[in-house]
Image (cartoon, rainbow, N blue to C red):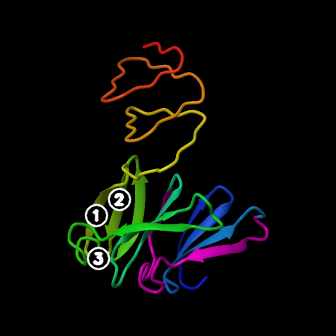
């Protein structure tokens, strides 16, 4: 670690933003008496993509890293596999270089990430609820709305409490009760 700025714990891992290395480091804390370095990610352009990584928050399978200097952004990292974190993207807000000038701290609440800009003296609210997941498997899913733009498959029964709409075609093999 070089220029460690913020640490957030998630499961058996500590995620550390590194100001000097422009990175997000992953540290195993499975054995708290002996933390061990796992890997780090610097984004697609090391030294630039995550320039002066500072603020850090984690929600679900994503780490949100605030950057300073030339990027002034929030970088999104997929940490589904802590051994191989993946750069998803970044935003510099509505007015790059000003609205998120020096993201010092990030907090997550619901579908929003709130980023505090130390040089811009501002708070930015970013809607992070629309992250796309190309493949998704779950045992139980509770949601207010579910929209499938492509093929949806269910191995067993589907229970619909309330309305059920089909915009185009539906193939039903077996019983459907609404």
Residue at the image position 46 percent from the left and 87 percent from the top: 47
Residue at the image position 39 percent from the left and 72 percent from the top: 104
Q: Earlier in the sequence, mark 1 or mark 3?
A: 3
Find out whether residue 67 is within the magenta segment: no
Q: Earlier in the sequence, mark 3 or mark 2?
A: 3
Quarter containing the N terminus: bottom right
Label 3, on which residue?
Answer: 101
- In percent of width and height, residue 81 lies at 62, 61
Residue at the image position 38 percent from the left and 17 percent from the top: 162
Label 2, on which residue?
Answer: 114
The magenta segment is 32-58
Label 3 environment density (alpha carbons within 10 Å; few <14, some 14–19, many ≥20) = many
Q: Earlier in the sequence, mark 1 or mark 2?
A: 2
The alpha-carbon separation of the residues under discs 1 and 3 comes to 10 Å
Furthest toward the left, the residue is 95
Looking at the image, residue 33 sits to the left or right of residue 62; the answer is right
Tell me the number on the disc at residue 94: none
Find out whether residue 52 is within the magenta segment: yes
Could you say which quadrant of the image residue 102 lies in? bottom left
- In percent of width and height, residue 64 lies at 45, 64
Q: Nearer the viewer, residue 51 or 114?
A: 51
Pointers 1 and 2 in contact (CB under 8 A)?
yes
Label 1, on which residue?
Answer: 123
């Amino acid at each position: 670690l070089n220029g460690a700025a913020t640490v957030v714990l998630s499961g058996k891992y500590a995620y550390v933003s590194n100001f000097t290395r422009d990175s997000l480091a992953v540290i195993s804390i499975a054995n708290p008496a002996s933390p061990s370095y796992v890997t780090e990610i610097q984004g697609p352009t090391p030294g630039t993509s995550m320039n002066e990584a500072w603020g850090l928050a984690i929600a679900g399978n994503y780490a949100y890293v605030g950057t300073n200097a030339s990027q002034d952004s929030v970088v999104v990292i997929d940490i589904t596999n802590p051994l191989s974190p993946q750069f998803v993207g970044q935003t510099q807000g509505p007015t790059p270089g000003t609205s998120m000038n020096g993201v010092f701290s990030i907090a997550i609440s619901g579908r929003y990430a709130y980023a505090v800009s130390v040089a811009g003296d501002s708070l930015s609210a970013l809607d992070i609820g629309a992250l796309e997941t190309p493949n998704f498997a779950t045992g139980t899913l509770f949601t207010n709305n579910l929209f499938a733009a492509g093929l949806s498959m269910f191995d067993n029964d589907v229970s619909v409490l309330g309305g059920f709409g089909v915009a185009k075609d539906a193939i039903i093999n077996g019983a459907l009760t609404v």
